[in-house]
Image (spheres, grey):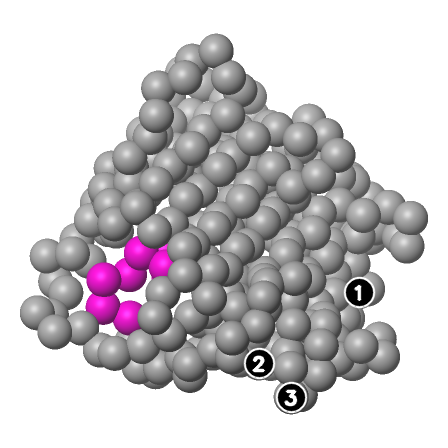
Amino acid sequence: MPPTAETVEVDFITPRHLAGGGDPAWITVPLHRACGWSHGNDPLMPRVILSSPDQKALLRLEPDTGGQWWTLSHAAEPDRPAWYASFGARTPVELIAAATDTLTDPAPSAEAPTDPFEPLRQIGWSPAIPDNGLASPDGTAYIQRLGSTDEPGAWFVTATLAPNRPVWQAHFGAHTPLRLVAAFTAALADPKPVPRMDSGRSLPTREPNVITRRTTDVPAVYVAGALEERVRSLAARYSAAPTNPLPSQQPPAKKNRIR
């Protein structure tokens, strides 16, 4: 049935890491409206730059045909050197949002997971490469951490259709808080499909043996309201936050430079 004036045709894609990037507003609008991040006004540049209220964190979205489109950076703090995370253009916004939502949480839970491997082990990812990593059962995604037990390094998460057909890669610097990396991998492990309205252009493949694509007519009001509901939900965290939030569970970092 073709969509009507009251419905919108939406594709629901699994696995989500092969669904394409999605709408950047899923990340940028809540950061600005719900979390108080400010942005500059440079309409002549094809980029977005948002800075946190304390001016310690910066999110840059800038089209770069040869590299990462998203870069999240954070200044040094007394217990942690400066850190960064970056994401390729086709990294699903739902995965990046999991990391930014965790960063902006005014009252992080002491029980929040801090082992980025654990959500993936729970869904059947297994060791497949020699460098401290895990691969998805279908072979289209893998994660590894460089370094050693004594000196752990940066994290790399890669989605690929073949050894010579990378789709996107996420980098997390050695000092990126583990709860952010774990939030990203938990979103990666989530089996729920993600919606896309432009999948004809954004899907890296339509191969039915690799992805599942279910097309549904969705009421337009639901599509239009999804972002507004996300903004309201994130903004509500601030009114519900305790006066004295739980202290960070991260151990002090060693004083070595970021890769």
Q: Is residue 37 left or right of residue 9?
A: left
Residue 150's disc number: 3
User: Dividing the picture into quarters, in which one does residue 141 lie?
Assistant: bottom right
- Amino acid on which disc 2 is placed: Glu
On the image, the x and y values in percent for residue 245 come to: 18, 73
Q: Choose mark 2 or mark 1, whichever is in front.
A: 2
Crowd rating for badge 2 (residues with CA inside 10 Å; few <14, some 14–19, many 20+): some
Q: Residue furthest top?
A: 44
Instruction: Name above or below for residue 44 compared with residue 53.
Output: above
Give SS at disc 3: loop
**Front residue of this view, candidates 191 and 102:** 102
**Dot 2 corresponds to which residue?**
118
- Report the Cα–Cα distance between label 3 and label 2: 20 Å
Marks 3 and 2, the one that precedes in the sequence = 2
Residue 16's disc number: none
Residue 138's disc number: 1
On the image, the x and y values in percent for residue 241 come to: 14, 65
Q: Is residue 25 visible?
A: yes
- The residue that appears at 55% across and 37% down in the rendered structure is 22
- Report the Cα–Cα distance between label 1 and label 3: 32 Å
Q: Choose mark 3 or mark 2, whichever is in front.
A: 3
Question: What is the span of residues highlighted in magenta in the rendered image?
Answer: 101-108
